[in-house]
Image: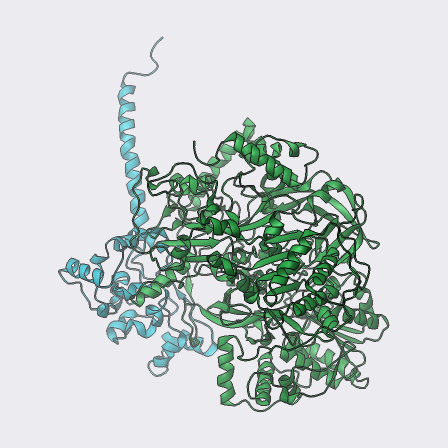
Amino acid sequence: MSQIFHRSANTISRVSIFGAVFVVAGLLVVFDEVNRSPWVTQADIARGQPIQFSHERHVAGNGLDCRYCHTSVEDSSFAGIPPTKTCMSCHSQIFANSPFLEPVRESFRTGRSIQWTRVHDLPDFVYFNHSIHVNKGVGCTTCHGQVDRMPLMWQEKSLQMEWCIDCHRSPELYVRPREAVFSVEYTPPGDQLQLGRRLVAEYQIQRLTSCSTCHR
Amino acid sequence: MGFGIRDSAEWLRDSTERIQDSAGFASNGSGAGKSRIPSPESRPDGFWRTLDELAGNPAFRERLYQEFPSQIEAITDPVERRTFLRLMGASLALAGLTACTRQPEEKIVPYVRQPEEIIPGKPLFFATAMPLGGVAAGLLVESHEGRPTKIEGNPQHPGSLGATDIFAQASVLGLYDPDRSQTLTRVGEIHPWPAFLGAIRAALTAQQSLQGAGLRILTESVNSPTLAAQIRDLLARFPQAKWHQWDPASRENARAGAMLAFGEYVEAQYRLDQADVILALDADFLGCGSGGLRYARDFTARRQPQRADRMNRLYALECMPTSTGARADHRLPLRASEIERVARLIAAGVGVSGLGPQVVFNPPFKWVDAITKDLQAHRGSSLVVAGDGQPAIVHAIAHAMNQTLGNVGRTLVYTDPVEAAPVDQLQSLRDLAADMDAGKVDLLVIVGGNPVYTSPADIALAGAMNNVALRVHLSLYDDETSELCHWQIPEAHFLESWSDARAYDGTVSIIQPLIAPLYGGKSAHELLAAMSDRPEQSGYDIVRQYWNRVRLATGSGSRSSSVESGQTYVVSGLSRTPQQAGERAATQPSPGPALSPEFDATWRRWLHDGVVPNTAFQPRSVAVKSGVLSPSSQPALFGGPSTGAGQGLEIVFRNDPSILDGRFANNGWLQELPKQITKLTWDNAVLVSPATAERLKAGGFPSAQGGEHGNITSSLVELRYGGRTVRGALLVVVGHPDDCATVHLGYGRRRAGHLGTGAGFDANAIRTSDAPWFGGGLDIVNTGDTFSLACTQFHHLMEGRGMVHAVTRDEFVRDPKSVHESRGTGIVGANGETPPRTITLYPEFKYEGYKWGMAIDVNACIGCNACVVGCQAENNIPVVGKDQVLRGREMHWIRVDTYYRGPAANPETYFQPVPCMQCENAPCEVVCPVGATVHSDEGLNDMVYNRCVGTRYCSNNCPYKVRRFNFLLYQDWNTPSLKLGRNPDVTVRSRGVMEKCTYCVQRINAAKIESEKQDRSVRDGEIQTACQQACPANAIVFGNLNDPGSRVAQLQAEVRNYSLLGELNTRPRTTYLAAIRNANRELDA
């Protein structure tokens, strides 16, 4: 019986089997990169809002503290989005006739809420609590980035689990003194590791990596 | 092997024989009952769960060891298997694709003006109360941004002490029930409220000249002082009008008994913490009725074996087994009609006079002797309680016994009635029907309730309705009564309305709404206001002004006799001197004095605390009248010859343990809740004893035919009683007396809503007002048809292993270790541990911080199911429906297992709640291929829903059968109103995900966060799991095992502590405390 395949078929099959390993590995790398890309995570993409609210103007320009609007950040899981009344407490005097602020005035007139687009949106099976992070020395900008330089809000970090767990495993790399938590100017000192270790001990920060810490 | 069942054949044989000899029944047909084959189902310690287990039925055993009995064909058929694999491949691919979606964009909708005190993300708790059957229990309701989501008991309320019952727990689902009546209708057409106002005011104007002769008001038991004042106010304006009351859930016989014994309505309040010996005459005082939560707490407080000398003893003579009977140290099943006879014998024994001629048993009936002696020995510290299903005479005998034994003032006190206007309600309803028949009624206003459905068959309320010119019905649902009324007004749920109510001891709570009426419902107060001269008064103003007047009249919220007036009111034809003296002055029709700021502060305090201080009734002294105890009629023969099959049986009517008189028929949590004792869901049944079922030859032995997962194929029988018939499924209940059938009311509803309509059969159809609770002459005829009942007693069988531990007090005192007799694997560790910790190769994990654990006291559990519904509410557990329960797919994270020991005719009963054990060596964790269930560093067995791919390996490997799988999309993701009621702190699970008890990890995390913010550790008792918080018996304790001072650590150190299936070396973190029965030696012999 004659050979069906030419001898070169052996080589071709060897090469293609060997090559398949790289192709599959390559696909995995691509998948991994896509999965972490802003295309999936929506990071670094400024989101449209019903009102062109600028954190840059309010924080860097006017020097408002985060807690002026996000009032429940120290007490609750939810940092709090200010009610229309908070906006109106200033904007009934300042830029009171600005057309940009018409949705705010309309909301206040009609009693209908402003519907903001959620920028930092964790999946519904994740239970994140702002208050405990703030109380343990995790600064606002650590997760939200330099909000004072964001004219429109975007998500600075990926908010993927590996990003969360990174800090939960080694909090000493990220924590700062409690008094600097709300500061947007704070920059980590050169000896962050040393400071972090001291704060971890002082604030009794635990390395919480059990699933039920966030998923329940 | 060495694990599990000790395989000493001889030992097993002996014990099996002993059980079967004492079983007192032989199975039919299959003939396996007499088999002497040692069966693994019959434990050497004699515990069993089903009759099949007890009989060692081989068919049952075969079924037990089949893995997929009902799907066996699909697995063996090769074509089917290929199709299955093909489908699985396709669905896997599709499922994979669907996972590749980006998160949808979400909106944040802040307040426009944020209300004070609301912090988004943090719940608030408000005190209120739930009135039910004329008694209220105080509640604390959790509210998330204005949405009530979870009900807890109010620790400051005397009728709750922090505990809740199943009805309170499930009421939050009732609030969001999409089937509630949502619009005001007139003969089916939607009308606005002013249209109704016009109609009713026109009708009332017509009544003005007749002095209201044609006006009738029908209410449920009125417990609200304000509502009573409003009705009296109306009656003052229309002197000829009549007020009728009918509430099938209220205590008809207790009222009649008090009237018979004392000549006036008084309330008996028990002080169970003072009672050493308690005799329950068909009384389920732990399970239901007035003060049940408080009584359960007080009762179990006296069952602590550490103080064995102070342990109380409970005798229960009862018909249908109840939780009280199950907790009794001695329970004697008697037909309902026999209770009176035995009560008389005991009464005569303790020295009650005026009982009339007595029957003497020869030889003497040892029960009567023993109970009599025990009661005699505890004069002043004993207590006799008569049940709501027993006639007035039994209540009177109980009153006389308590008086003769000197218990009054010690173990019970008499007070004014809690109801605002107690009345013979059956007579009241009869009078109303007669008046309607006679055409005397022009305007009928039905305030709450569903009398057309709940009235006994001989009171033809439905037929008489047409004689009434204008009929108005205020109710939560558009039900059977609404159908026959012109106007149907959607009622505001108690969580939506202002009102007030009294607890079992008279303490007043102001009912405050947690949410504005979802469907524009009106409260009873607002309906009554519509009939007054101030029709638009709000419920808030009515209640507040009433209490302002009371306060001005009495100087405080309490009652004083100084303002007593001699007025009498006609209440359904019965004259009654008003007793609510301080509140009497408040019954003025005037708008009332202005509200002072001082009152405002007091009012706020009342609302905050949930109780109005010093409003509990003071004890009164009353004496049993002479000559009331002589036999009223020929008592039924005790122990007499039983009649032949299917003839002359006795029928007993009871409110359903889960849905009462049908008012909760559309509540899925309650419908799916396995009922106490029977463990039946979604249906009622004709409940008979094993012997009676066998005599009826009703298509074999229903209970013995529990198929896979308790899909009981039961005989459909016809009940013929008093010339009326109804068809229902037969179900065998162990411990039920022979020649007697119990039927539960509340089923067979025609217009209950999506869930309640059509479930079960309507026992009201054969119930008559002359014998509303039991009667003789029942005929049971087998129709030859069968019916599937969903009964969870057969679910999750542990194949005869690892039952409860229970001994008598005497044994326990002699040798405390006796609770653990005949246990273990035989492998003993160095420190006496079995199995030793060294049995596993893995190193032991060291818990640095918290180490959570739970202890469940089997000795305290009364099987009330409050934990099950509490867990369901807290953890967003879906309802699956009867069809899925039949397949064993109910989703409850905690179940209450019922175990029996002894003969089927009258076994000892033990309840064992089983949540996830959070095993140290969890068998589920090692088999999960995706790490969806892993151990946390605080000892929890975490379940990660988002990782779960639904292999169900974990469930298969769980020896406790506590894992639940979402086979279908059980959770309702669409109905908007149901979304409001969910707990936002717990994930709502979707299809294909495994779930289980998490020890309420959301509560653990919340408490940990709060404590860490304050730089301290979590205090003992700071975290209460939902089951623990609901438990009226304090049977469940949760805490940190690393803290030796914590309650749970102390309980787990007790000698009674045992692990369920501990011999498997799973090292469960939830452990149990053995039950101790305080047996009377005389009866135990």
Q: Position of residue A177 (x, y in %)?
A: 21, 66
Q: Residue at x 56, y 37 (%)?
A: B42
Compared with residue B473, is residue B548 higher up or lower down, i.e. above or below? Answer: below
| B913 on left or right of B770 | left
Question: Toward the viewer: A97 or B222?
Answer: B222
Q: Residue furthest bottom?
A: B593
Count of numbered circles in the view? 0
Which image quadrant for residue A77?
A: bottom left
Quadrant position of the N terminus of chain B in the picture: top left
Identity of the residue drawn at 52% across and 41% down = B798
- Left or right: A190 in relation to B389: left
Residue B89 visible, this orientation = yes
Toward the right, the furthest residue is B438
Determine the colour of chain B. green
Quadrant position of residue B855: bottom left
Question: Which of the two residues, A141 or B383, is positioned nearer the viewer here?
Answer: B383
Residue B192 versus residue B36 in the image, above or below: below
- Picture coordinates of residue A200, whole percent (x, y): 22, 60
Name the spot of residue B583 as percent of width and height, x first.
Answer: 63, 84
Give percent across and percent down for residue B1085.
61, 47
Residue lying at the far top in this picture: please name it. Answer: A1
Residue B531 showing in the rendered view: no
Q: Chain letter for cyan?
A: A
- Quarter where residue A78 is shown: bottom left
Q: How is the image coloured?
A: by chain
Q: Along the line of sight, which residue is nearer the eye, B684 or B343?
A: B343
